[in-house]
Image (cartoon, rainbow, N blue to C red):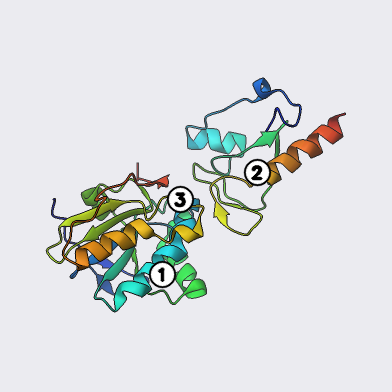
Amino acid sequence: MLGEECLDPQAVEVREVPTDETAEREGFVGSPTIRIDGRDIAPTEGEPVGLTCRVYRTRDGSVSPVPDREDLRDALRRHHEHST
Amino acid sequence: MSTAPDFRLPDTDGAEHGPDGVTVVVFTCNHCPYALAWHERLLAVASDYADRGVRTLLINPNDAERYPRDSLDAMRERVASEGPWPAPYLRDSDQAVARAYGAQTTPDVFVLDAERRVRYRGAPDSDHGDESAGAQWLRDALDAVLDGRDPDPAETDPVGCSVKWRS
């Protein structure tokens, strides 16, 4: 997808959040969390910080352990527009 | 074919339940996206097979101290808002039952026959993201056990979030 959006796949940094302390420090609300330049692609309000699985809703309303691909694509495009 | 441990666990109203006859034991929880994705399919199985004498038990074994969304109060609130369910939602507060069964994920499904032998263990179906998959692996296993056949497959890889063990 990054290639499709003319972005550099090498720019992706995968970070492990191994402890509660790290989760607290990072404001980590569950795995996977995807941030673009520090901004969550699906920001949440009131989600507790912790080592847990994250619940996403896909565009058809289904529960999913990963974000909807089109939500991720939209986030990438929004970021690209704001940064150019 | 191993024999599953017997147990009695309280549901959200305090009533105790355990395996009795052909029983589906599902380790699950409130907050895991895989457990949530499969939840309605598992309830449909519980409902569809109840009149064939199959008992379904949903067990939440997660550490509620670190994961308050899996506390007994949170379980009660969920059942109150979503229920009634065709299967009791049980609290495994000391995680002894999950450990005895070797539960790995939420969900992790076990089908026990009337002698409490484990006849199927694994995922409900092949794709948590596809409602139409319909918990078919679980249904096929139940059909086999009820018909006196061996389920095929008898085991699949459980898929989901890891059980949140107490440290």
Which residue is more in the foreground, B129 or B61? B129
Q: Give residue B127's mark.
A: 3
**Residue bearing mark 1:** B44
Provide the secondary structure element on which disc 3 rests. loop
- Residue in the picture at 32% in, 59% down: B138
Q: Quadrant of residue B9?
A: bottom left
Q: Amino acid at mark 3?
A: Asp
- Residue lying at the far right in this picture: please name it: A84
Which residue lies at the image location 54% right of the left edge and 41% below the top edge?
A31
* Residue at mark 3 to residue at mark 1: CA–CA distance: 16 Å
Q: Quick check: do tags 2 and 3 share a chain? A: no
Q: Which mark is residue A69?
A: 2
Secondary structure under tag 2 reads helix
The residue lying at 49 percent from left, 55 percent from top is: B31
Mark 1: which amino acid? Ala
Point out residue B154 in the picture as x, y percentages from the top left corner.
24, 51
Which residue is rendered at x = 33% and y = 70% of the image?
B11
Side of B117 relative to A46 (left or right)? left
Which residue type does callout 2 highlight?
Answer: Arg
Give the class, few, some or many, for how many residues have Cα within 10 Å of label 2's Cα (few <14, many ≥20): few
Counting from the top left corner in percent of width and height, residue B69 is at 48, 57
Q: Is residue A40 left or right of residue B95?
A: right
